[in-house]
Amino acid sequence: MPTTSPNVQLLFQPFSGGKLELSNRIVMAPMTRCFSPGGVPGPDVAAYYRRRAENGVGLIVTEGTVIDHPAAAADRDVPHFYGERALEGWAQVVKEVHEAGGRIIPQIWHVGMSRNPATFPESDTKPVGPSGYSAPNVKTGEPLSEQEIAYLVEAYGRAAGEAKRLGFDGVEIHGAHGYLIDQFFWEETNKRTDRYGGGLVERTRFAVEVIEACRRAVGPDFPIVLRLSQWKPLDYKAKLASTPEQLEKFLEPLALAGVDIFHCSTRRFWEPEFEGSDLNFAGWTKKLTGKPTITVGSVGLDTEFTQLFSEGKGANVNGLEGLLERLERQEFDLVAVGRALLADPAWAAKVRDGRTDELVPFSPEATKSLS
């Protein structure tokens, strides 16, 4: 029998902020798919995103799309955000989503030291990072030169400019999960002694230059979202900032550089970020910066996402009461949904209409079609 929480309509209130105008608060989280052969998104990719827009998702953040740099990708079938054919494919994605009444932004990405050379046996391109560390105390490369850093900064800027040219509704910069920008943030992978290294604030310099390059490319009114995480794939308990005071110092230069919205990645949205407060990462980020924030982390499911891959578990549909209580308190502004939307393109419409008994549980099988 259809059931719905009395305040579920909070998810479907319009949002206006961070230079974005959205019909509701539901965001499709970026999820890597590797369904773009040779880096070119085809009609199936456009149809995949259109289905979510048709079913009431307020904002779609695309899967990670790599910038124009030889070492940007970790898989040959991850989509590119450069080159005529790839950009034509993304133009069709934008067209389909807009025709369905949706909004969409690309996530621009460089994997840094996460690139495995064995995946590309035909290539001599080596992974790059701030200090050549692929993990704490594991050095597998050489530090980037300042000249190479300058090239990377401009590559991000070019990608943001292409997003605007193609008609996207904004752009998200991937600064989380142990990839290139995050490798500059984390002291375990950034051992530099020049202006791109040092303390927590000094380690934001690369990201600040990337954000500034993107802002120059898109102008003052185009939304820029930055995705951040404290946790790392190699250390789920890692924290860039261990106190609210440290987090404020870390976020300030990023906000001043031109970020409009912070996308705050956690494994479980309901977990407090610091002792002594119930606020999660998105809640603290909004409180400290005054900027709109997106929360994410096992929304609508009863198992956090990393267990799926480490233990082969599926996840059952879970209630939204705790999420809605936080949204009602305005702890954050937008809610990113990942696996639940991956398994069920109509997730948003079913939640809106009280058809929660029809929601499709997520299972490892869902990753095989990613429909």
Image (cartoon, grey):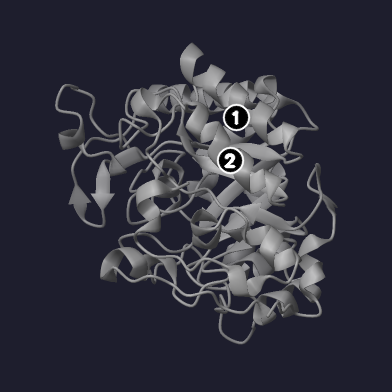
The one nearer the camera, 189 or 97, is 97
Are the residues tagged 2 and 1 within 8 Å (C-beta)?
yes
State which tag comes first along the sequence, 2 or 1: 2
Question: Which residue, given by chain and number where applicable, does mark 1 sit on?
Answer: 93
Q: Quadrant of residue 149?
A: top left
Say few, some or many: other residues with alpha carbon within 10 Å of mark 2 (under 14 / 14 to 19 / 20 or more): many
- The answer to whether 32 appears left or right of 5 in the picture is left
Question: Label 2 vs label 1: CA separation?
Answer: 7 Å
What label does residue 356 carry, if any? none
Farthest residue toward the top?
Answer: 84
Q: Quadrant of residue 350?
A: bottom right
Task: Measuring from the top left, give residue 123's x and y in whole percent.
Answer: 19, 22
* Residue type at the position of mark 2: Tyr
| Residue 245 sits above or below residue 176 on the image | below
What label does residue 49 carry, if any? 2
Q: Secondary structure at mark 1?
A: helix
| Residue 71 sits above or below residue 136 on the image | above
Task: Measuring from the top left, give residue 185's x and y in whole percent.
Answer: 45, 51
Which residue shows up at 40% across the image and 67% down it? 238
| Residue 56 sits above or below residue 37 on the image | below
The one nearer the camera, 225 or 276, is 225
- The answer to whether 120 appears left or right of 130 in the picture is left
- The answer to whether 92 appears left or right of 131 in the picture is right
Which residue shows up at 23% across the image and 24% down it? 125
The one nearer the camera, 123 or 194, is 123
Is residue 208 visible in the rendered structure shown here? Answer: no
- The answer to whether 68 appears left or right of 60 in the picture is left
* Residue type at the position of mark 1: Val
